Image (tube, rainbow, N blue to C red):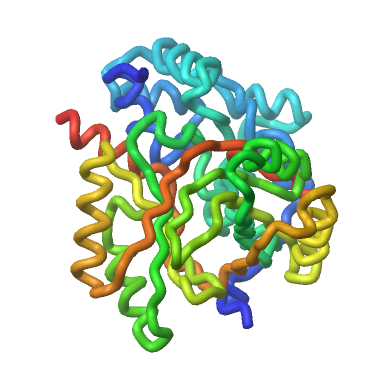
Amino acid sequence: MDIQGDIAQVNLVPLERRLIDRFQRDFPLCARPYLAIAEELGATEAEVMAALARLRDTGALSRIGAVVHPNVAGASTLAAMAVPPQELAAVAEIISAYPEVNHNYEREHRFNLWFVVIAPDAESRGCVLERIATETGHRVLDLPLEAAYHIDLGFPLS
Amino acid sequence: MITPFDQRILAAIADGLPLVERPFAELAQRTELSEQEVIDRVRALVDGGVIKRFGLVVRHHELGYRANAMVVWDVPDDRVDAVGALLKAHSFVTLCYRRPRRPPDWPYNLFCMIHGCDRATVLGQMAMLRAIDGMESVPYTVLFSRQRFKQRGATYARFLEASHG
């Protein structure tokens, strides 16, 4: 069962769909970016800003911002833990409370809890993993990036 | 390497560009740079590859991509770069990374992510990857996501700012 199923799917109007299809990358870097977008899409600046606000309010839009190349700024790692199912919610809550943790998912595997840790440098990243292991009582699998063949470049809706 | 100014800009945009007519002017106030300096530095970070993309960061699940699979492979070390290049050529592969094995618990060294509307679609896409010449015999496993406890943007930037005073 997909526990996330209770999150409503956002039904997009055409302008919202075009914004997502066109501007996950190459967002205009100019003083009036929403105006530049509006001119390209044949809408008004107010319509573009309203559409983006609705996408943000419904949760479909996380933010308008930068996806930074891994490990260029700060030190990140992917970590995994094998947690008994009855402990999972409590352990996940402990881990999510760390400000250095920015993704935290349950996955279908013996290693069932997966999270990303981002810290200013490798040493502090290691300290965070140690603190998490101590606090939860579970060993942490530390899987830092070694090579990126393909990183997040946006996502086609079609 | 990125400069302290760049770190300030990354920190300022970590929560996203504000929805105001002149969003970079608002960021400029937070960073004590001018609007044009902020725009120029962001562009330089994009051109220099520090920022891989600047734009809308969406949540797949809310857009109807309900099946999110992390696919992991145990590829011989001398082939992993070539296999990574093959996998990324498929548009449904949204991420592809090499990571260390951790024997005996974790034998897998190549990770890719597939987002699909449903599990059947993703399994079909998996079959396409398995059908790539030479991939049939590579051990792999698929880890579908079940529950999202936390998903948030680039907190590293706030850390950089904190760590640099």
In percent of the image, x 75 and y 40: which residue is there?
B86
Relative height, residue B7 to residue A6 (above, below): above
Q: Does B27 sit left or right of A109 as displayed?
A: left
Q: Residue furthest left?
A: B165
Question: In this rendering, does residue B67 appear at all?
Answer: yes
Relative height, residue B51 to residue B117 (above, below): above
In percent of the image, x 20 and y 51: which residue is there?
A127
Instruction: Indicate the position of residue A89 as horizontal and vertical percent values.
Output: 37, 79
Instruction: Indicate the position of residue B28 as horizontal and vertical percent values.
Output: 35, 21
Q: Does B46 sit left or right of A137 as displayed?
A: right
Relative height, residue A112 to residue B81 (above, below): below
Instruction: Indicate the position of residue B161 as horizontal and vertical percent values.
Output: 24, 33
* Relative depth, front residue between B160 and B73: B73
In percent of the image, x 73 and y 70: which residue is there?
B119
In percent of the image, x 28 and y 40: which residue is there?
A122
Count the numbered circles shown. 0
Question: In this rendering, does residue A102 appear at all?
Answer: no
Relative height, residue A95 to residue B156 (above, below): below
* Relative depth, front residue between B11 and A140: A140
* Relative depth, front residue between A94 and B124: B124
Image quadrant in which you'd find residue A92: bottom left
* Relative depth, front residue between B107 and A138: B107
Specify the quadrant that holds the N terminus of chain A: bottom right
Instruction: Indicate the position of residue B102 as horizontal and vertical percent values.
Output: 43, 58
